Image (spheres, grey):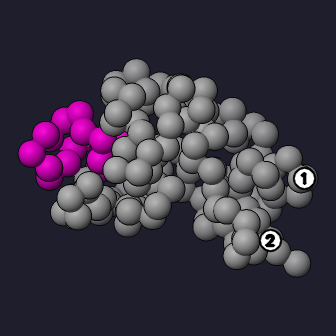
Amino acid sequence: MIKEFCQHCGRPLLTKASRADHYHARCLLRVEAGIAEIAKHYSAAQLAKAANAISTGRIDYRPGGVSLVKGTAGTIYRTTSTGCSCAAHIPCWHMATVQVKDLSPGPPVEVEPERPGPGVAKLFAALDVDVIDV
């Protein structure tokens, strides 16, 4: 049996709906509210790049520490939720990436190979932001 865990709290997902969302219902509401708050500080383009970086695994996330985010040109940036080593400094999409990951530090999802991983696009959908290939 494939076990999946909530990407926010780490508890096992027991319902079909929660497995489809990759979050418990209450956790999904918390994460969506957190993303809406983050969105107030970034442009739609920055949020799209952050969503893409998360969905394509271009972040070496380290909770409470300095994460490594691979930029669009392949450069690796040392990034926290409050600062970044890129030329833009603040606010940059690398920081938005870490801030979103801070909302969902749960364990990785164990899924069947033919099933997609956690859908970052769904979380950003309420903000009318597409996950784009950058």
Q: State yes or no: residue 50 in magenta.
A: no
Q: Is residue 86 above or below residue 29?
A: below
> Mark 1 is on which residue type?
Thr
On residue 3, the disc is 2
Residue in the image at 90% along x and 53% along y: 15
Farthest residue toward the front?
Answer: 133
- Which quarter of the image is occupied by the N terminus? bottom right
Residue in the image at 64% along x and 62% along y: 117
| Residue 19 position in % (x across, y down) | 80, 55
Which residue carries the number 1 mark?
15
> Which sits in the foreground, 103 or 39?
39
On residue 129, the disc is none
Q: State yes or no: residue 96 in magenta.
A: yes
| Residue 52 position in % (x across, y down) | 44, 50
Prevailing SS of the magenta stretch: loop
> Which sits in the foreground, 110 or 114?
114
Residue in the image at 57% along x and 47% along y: 120
| Residue 58 located left or right of residue 36 | left
Looking at the rendering, the stretch of residues picked out in magenta corresponds to 80-98
Q: Is residue 78 visible?
A: no
Q: Is residue 41 above or below residue 92?
A: above
> Mark 2 is on which residue type?
Lys
| Residue 40 position in % (x across, y down) | 40, 21
| Residue 71 located left or right of residue 101 | left
| Residue 110 position in % (x across, y down) | 70, 72
- Dot placed on the residue nearer the N-terminal end, 2 or 1: 2
> Which sits in the foreground, 69 or 56?
56
Judging from the image, what secondary structure is the residue with disc 1 in?
Answer: loop
